[in-house]
Each structure stands twice: as C-alpha cells, then as structure tokens.
Amino acid sequence: MKLSKLLSSLGISSGFQEVEVSDIVYDSRKVKPDCLFVCLRGSASDGHRYAADAARAGACVIVAEEPVEAPGAQVLLTGDTKTALALLSAAFFGNPAERELKVIGITGTKGKTTTAYMVHSILESAGHKAGVMGTIGVLIGDEVTALENTTPASYEVQKHLRRMADAGCEYCVMEASSIGLKDQRVAGIPFEVGVFTNFSEDHIGGVEHRDMQEYLESKAKLFSMCKTGVVNLDDDNVEGILKGHTCKVKTYGFGQAAQLRGADCRHLTRPGFLGIAFEVAGELAFTAEVGIPGRFNAYNALAAIACCHVLGIPVEAMKQGVSRVKVKGRVEPVPVPGNYTLLLDYAHNAVSMENLLVTLREYEPKRLICMFGAGGNRPKVRRYEMGEMSGRLADLSVLTADNSRFENVLDIIEDIKTGIHKTAGKYVEIPDRREAIRWCLEHAQDGDIIVLAGKGHEDYQEIEGVKRPFDERVVIREILREMKEKQA
Ligand SMILES: CC(=O)N[C@H]1[C@@H](OP(=O)(O)OP(=O)(O)OC[C@H]2O[C@@H](n3ccc(=O)[nH]c3=O)[C@H](O)[C@@H]2O)O[C@H](CO)[C@@H](O)[C@@H]1O[C@H](C)C(=O)N[C@@H](C)C(=O)N[C@H](CCC(=O)O)C(=O)O
Ligand SMILES: Nc1ncnc2c1ncn2[C@@H]1O[C@H](COP(=O)(O)OP(=O)(O)OP(=O)(O)O)[C@@H](O)[C@H]1O
C-alpha cells in the first residue's frame, strides 16, 4: 500500500517521500523488506531501542515517539505510537470496521466470553453471519484461530476483522479487555454497540492495572467509542463506567429501573442438561430459556438480548439464540449415556471455582463431583485455596494434573491437599488426567453433576514445556467408547 494512503489515516498529507509499504510490523524480529516499523513502549522492553535494527533489516519507515537512529529509513514522530499502530493497521486492512462490519464490543470483569457467544448465537439465529474475537480465539464459521490475548494487538485485531469481512460476516462480536482498551488495541473502531457486564477486583498489579480507578477508567473508554452503550444497571460501578460517555445508553438489569428487565429466575434441569429461565420485561416481554446453567448466565443472556434489541433483532431469534448457545469450556455440557450431567469449565482459581460450585449446588445434584488440578510454576497459594474451596463445596474432589509445566504433578497435588485438609471434604488422587476422567465416568451415579475444571476451551496439556494434545471432549468420547466395548 502507498505510504501516503496509510499516512492519511493519521491526518498527514505531506512531508514524506512516496514509497510502497509491504506490511506494518511492531516487532523488530519480524521485520521484512519495505515494511513500516512502529516503536511501542512495552512492559518489558521498548521498541524504540530496536528502530536501528529494524531499519537495517529493511524497514523503510519508522514510526516513533522520540528521535531514533534509523539508517536509510524515513522517521515519523508522533505523540502516541500505540494509537498510530491501530489507525495505520485499520487503513492497511481497508478499514473493515468502517465499511463492511458492525462491531460489538463487550467489556466487564466477568462474562465477556459468554455474553459474546450469546450475542453471536442470537445474530446467527436471525440469519446474520457473525465472527467472534476473544479469549477462545477468533471464530469464523466453524473455524477457531487461537489468539495470544483476549484482545490482541491492534494489528491482529484489524487483520482478523478483514478476515471476517472477507468471509462475508456482517458482524464481529469482540471482547474488549480493559488492558486492550488501555493499550489502544481497539482504537479507531467505531463500535456499533458497547456492552458492560459487571465490575469487580481483578487484573490489578504487575504488568496489568495500577489500581481499581485505572481499571474502571480503562473499561469506561469503550463508552466514548460506541454508538450505543448497553449497561448493567444493577452493578455498583455503572456511574463510573458511564463517566464521560458520548454514546446513547440502554440499561438492563433485574431491578425495576432498567429499560430491559429480567425477573423470576428459575433453574431448568434434566439429565445431561442444566439451564436457567427468566422473564424479560420492560421494552420487550417474553420468556428466555438459556441453554447453560447459573444465575450469572441470566445476566449474560439479558445483556446479549439488550444488545440485540439495540441492533433490531427479532424476539424469536433472541429466544432461539440463548437456548442454543454453547460456549466452549464455560459450564459446557458433554453428552453422556447415563442419567448424570458432565460439564467442562475453565475455573482455575478459587473465586471462579466458588462461583461454579455454588451455582451447580443450586441444581440440587445427588453428588457434586469436582475434578481439578492446578498449574505448575504458578503461585502455590492458588492450589491451597482451590483445594479448600472444593473440599468445602463439592461432595467429592478428584485431584489430578492440569498444566504441570516444569513441576512434578505429585507435588502440586500435595499442595492442593494442604487446602483440602482444612475441610472435611472427601477426595481421591489420580495424577493422570485421562485416568481421572475415566474414574469419574466409571463411578458416576444417577443424578450426579460432575465438573471437570481447569482446562475449559484448551485442547492441550502443558508438561515440561511441551503442549501435548488433550481435548477433553475427545478424551471423553474415547473413554466412553472403550467402556462400551468392555461391556459388550
Ligand atoms: C503486559 C502486556 O500487556 N503485554 C503485551 C504487550 O507486550 P509487552 O508490552 O510486554 O512487550 P515488550 O516485550 O515490553 O516489548 C515492547 C515492544 O518492543 C518490541 N520488541 C521487543 C523485543 C525485540 O527484540 N524487538 C522488538 O521490537 C515488542 O514487539 C513490543 O512492540 O504487547 C504484546 C503484543 O500486543 C502482548 O501480547 C502482551 O501481552 C502479554 C502476553 C500479556 O500477558 N498481557 C496481558 C496482561 C493482557 O493483555 N491481558 C488482557 C486481559 C485478559 C483478561 O481479561 O483476562 C488481554 O486482552 O489478553
Ligand atoms: N455475569 C457474570 N457474573 C459473575 N460471574 C460470571 C458471569 N459470567 C460468567 N461468570 C463466571 O466467570 C467465569 C468466566 O466467564 P467468561 O469466560 O464468560 O468471562 P470473561 O469475562 O470472558 O472472563 P476471562 O476474562 O477471565 O476470560 C465463568 O465460568 C463463571 O464462573
């Protein structure tokens, strides 16, 4: 693409010699001839240090916030290279969000992935092709491409928006993480709708947010980037989220003041299926039956319904969408032949495990069985806490491996047991995860709820630095087949 065309996205029309730019790159190790290199200040390093290397490797233009040495390349100085990267990338990929796609952004501490998949399910039920971008990866049709971040670097965001537009999508539903918003990874995207799910303490410290105020302000940015903001009126921080907003506002919640209200939540249960139903009132009136369990999923469904209401989607598609929704690894049911329920969930810390087990307990299982392990080379306190939580809330804990990384799985299990021993919780230890799943399936009784926690959407197990294929859906199918063959 011509440099002049790219620079017009930054409002620059003169001062540079015209060249053909082959690509945009922000990592000097990936520079290719005639590319434009953007220097970013990161958490561990500073791209400005690599400007000279990038120029020597063939970059023809360097975008920087301070003068840099760049032999043979033209240097463009700007006040904010992160925003520049976002705008240049949008132009490089032909501005897919301006011309071809309606983009919906979802922010909040919890429920982003689930709400995104609910909006996607409703849109597809209404006959609209939509893509999803977030923690699970990029979904286009049935194909999922993994991502390094929930909200990836702006160049990747724009590249995947282009892929969606080329695949004929009308919509992109994307998770806008607070760090993604702070880092300008979605800068320049004219969001059709921004959705706020909820706000609580998370992502503070280290390379993430300085404090809660910065975390809240980062999320709030979405509401000056979208046409309509759909916000949870029951959340205590809604005022903070809307501070400085420039969008129209649509409210949802289970309280009386919301424009779109939920009421009368009730559990739906039959063998192999758990869901939640509620009444939608206010601007719409119908019964929503959600195909995944938990009161929090009634909130996520109401958020998705409110978002689709703004988009003018008919009620019939909303009903169908929330009842059909499946989110990989988020209280995901797996079909089994017996009269019990088997679920996969991503919970891999004490807070999510508490949320999950308290929610499942509400379905009054005969026994609640929780199979889990804990990550190696991660803080031990997480293992003690998870052990204590499962010991307190499950009828039986099955202790096994997760991503042990470079640690011995038996040592990790010992740490989990330290937590369990603070409770009267029963447990069994089966260090091999496949064998632990087999044990659960062989010992399942009618009315049980068995949850395999920790891996969620992941399809690998990381042991000694190697990611080995391990998709629990496949493993379960194989074990069930072996059990059937043994019986025959
Ligand atoms: C702290 C943080 O957000 N880091 C992100 C950031 O990398 P960084 O700032 O650490 O990069 P750096 O190593 O300091 O390097 C700075 C610059 O110098 C460049 N460089 C570096 C070395 C070199 O030799 N040459 C060179 O050019 C780098 O390419 C980069 O442009 O930019 C990378 C590319 O966009 C991200 O992948 C990376 O996310 C890391 C993996 C991460 O863990 N981020 C977390 C905190 C995050 O973003 N999480 C959110 C929220 C998730 C949630 O809601 O649960 C997310 O959206 O994923
Ligand atoms: N609306 C909600 N309120 C509270 N907890 C929720 C809500 N939705 C989901 N959860 C809990 O959080 C877990 C993660 O849900 P989900 O992946 O949808 O959220 P997320 O915001 O994408 O999270 P993450 O950024 O950690 O991936 C769920 O398994 C559930 O236990």
Image (tube, rainbow, N blue to C red):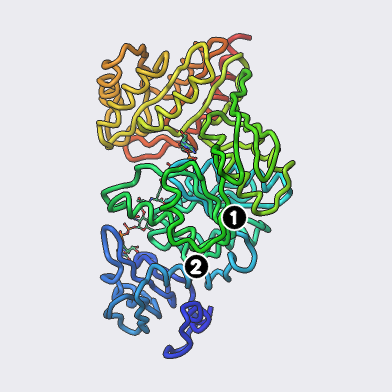
Is residue 374 in sight in this rendering?
Answer: yes
Residue kind at label 1, given as amino acid type = Cys
Select label 2 or label 1 by which is in front: 2
Q: Residue at x 28, y 58 (%)?
A: 43
Determine crowd level at label 2: few under 14, some 14-19, many 20+ residues with C-alpha closer than 10 A. Answer: many
Q: Horizontal and vertical percent for residue 328?
A: 54, 37
Task: Work out which residue is located at the far front of the displayed protein and give it.
Answer: 257
Q: Horizontal and vertical percent for residue 72?
A: 34, 84
Q: Quadrant of the C terminus?
A: top right
Is residue 474 in sight in this rendering?
Answer: no
Q: Which mark is residue 115?
A: none
Asked if the residue at label 1 sits under 8 Å from ligand 1, the reply is: no
Task: Check the image and report above or below for 108 versus 8.
Answer: above
Q: Residue at x 32, y 23 (%)?
A: 387
Q: Residue at x 72, y 43 (%)?
A: 315
Determine crowd level at label 1: few under 14, some 14-19, many 20+ residues with C-alpha closer than 10 A. Answer: many
Asked if the residue at label 2 sits under 8 Å from ligand 1, the reply is: no
Q: Residue at x 62, y 31 (%)?
A: 278
Question: Element type at marker 1?
Answer: strand
Q: Quadrant of residue 220?
A: bottom left
User: Is tag 2's residue or tag 1's residue first in the polypeptide sequence?
Assistant: 1
Looking at the picture, tell me which residue is in the foreground, 132 or 179.
179
Q: Quadrant of residue 321?
A: top right
Q: Horizontal and vertical percent for residue 434?
A: 45, 23
**Residue matched to label 1:** 172
Q: CA distance from mark 2 to mark 1?
A: 15 Å
**Residue matched to label 2:** 188
